[in-house]
Image: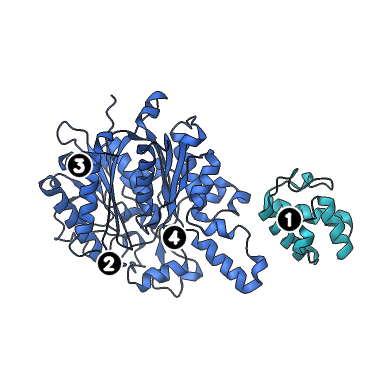
Chain colours: A blue, B cyan
Amino acid sequence: MSSNDQGSVVITGLGATTPLGGDVASTWSAMLAGTSGVRPITESWADDLPVKIAAPAAADPVEIVGRVQARRMDRCEQLALVAAREAWADAGAPEVDPFRLGVAVTSGIGGIGSTLAAYDALNDKGWKRISPYTVPMLMPNGSAGWISMELGARAGAHAMVSACASGAETIGYGIDMIRSGRADVVVAGGTEAAIMALNIGAFAVMRAMSTRNDEPEKASRPWDKGRDGFVLGEGAGIVVLESEAHARARGARVYAVAAGAGYSADAHHISHPLPDGAGVKHAINSAIADAGISPEQIAHVNAHATSTPEGDLLEAAAIASALGEASSGVVLTSTKSMTGHLLGGSGAIETVAAVKALVDRTAPPTINLDDPDEAVTLEVATKARSLEPRGDAPMAVLNNSFGFGGHNVTLVFTEHTPA
Amino acid sequence: MTEQEIQAGLAEIIDEVAGVPADEVTPEKSFVDDLDIDSLSMVEIAVAAQDKFGVEIPDEQLKDLKTVQDVITYVSKNV
């Protein structure tokens, strides 16, 4: 749809279960306080790995979904369901025609824990001892399926997969479902539960992970000169997207406008970004154009910045280049400094953080930025920072997400001004 | 093994797999219609029953075991 439809999709519900807290309120207050969710891995499976730190979900989803339900769901699906329930309740559990209610919830990897458990069962005990729920537990669209069942959502249940951009891309798809008239309400987001030996080993062998094992809380340090890779986190973030007309008709509380999305593909290398940042810049510029805003409206960017030597700088330079003169006055942050990197969950949790920043007019900090890399020209919040509107137009915030495969996604959220 | 023992053992499995309280697992109950157990959970229950009672339940047999009594009878005959 063209940009004259902007403002037609709003956010009316938020849900999250993260390394910082089991819901949005606890996660957000921990973010504002600059809390790290990174912990030592004490289990023996990490003994021979070079990485012995991670950011596990703060709340056990099994206690919420229940023992019997949990044995049929991968942990990433459990986390997604917990966050979806919170978001749905937060939106006021609206009455929606089932065929006008959609789901767009994904995972970057899918139920890898269930895959590994099934493989162990296969090798140790034979095929009959594999759980008959293995396939629904390992498929990356499993969360979308479970949430559609929970809510009776029949307009479609989707899961875009683009590695660490999956959550953001799937929220973008949810926005499109409403813009294109397929749904009035869409529950959208991402989830991940991949803290296990295979994944850590596989990322570590790429030399992508921090090995600051003796200082877990300092390991995720985007834009700091001492950064040495990302920390793996787990959790889920969910938003309730709604057509503005539908939200207005039911008198819903509106957090923000889901104003637009921009995408690009680097078409360069399977895991390295395009060195000149042209792909990232194109995603940012496309999102701004799609949202119909001017760069001067942007007060805050929740960056992808994962604490890797290469990616952090490239993104900061691409933001500065894309926003031009408007980049001075933008408050940049990476909440991954606190949550770690939730892969397919990150874009969704960071969407929740970006929307909360807009609502509270406060940017959460980037912690551990003790020795900032001089190459970063943008202003980075190291403490929670209040945001001021720049001019009369509604304040806007961006969320960037990038994934192996060369996927770049930028989402734009703006303050909602009732008609 | 008495029928009561088989019923109690089966009830334990069904609680574990499907969360049905043991006192609801009575002989006349149908797995699908009364206990709301789907075909995937039925596979899990059959495997767990084989392990617990030491009785092989072939797939062609499994589809005929529709009630709790069917399983009790099958196990007590084949154990």
- Please name whichever residue, A405 or A300, is drawn nearer the observer in this view of the structure: A405
* Label 4 chain ID: A
| SS label for mark 4 | loop
Residue type indicated by callout 1: Ile
> Is label 3 or label 1 in front?
3
Which residue is identified by label 4?
A109
Asked if disc 4 and disc 1 are in contact, CB closer than 8 Å, the reply is: no
* Comes first in the chain, label 4 or label 3: 4
Rendered image quadrant of residue A277 = bottom left
Vertical comparison of A12 with A147: above or below:
above
Q: Which mark is residue A298?
A: 3
Q: Which mark is residue B13?
A: 1
Vertical comparison of A25 with B31: above or below:
above
> Whole-Å distance between the Cαs marked 4 and 3?
32 Å
> Whole-Å distance between the Cαs marked 4 and 2?
19 Å
> Whole-Å distance between the Cαs marked 3 and 2?
28 Å
Q: Which mark is residue A272?
A: 2
Image-based side of A51 in relation to B28, left or right: left
* Label 2 chain ID: A
Residue type indicated by callout 2: His
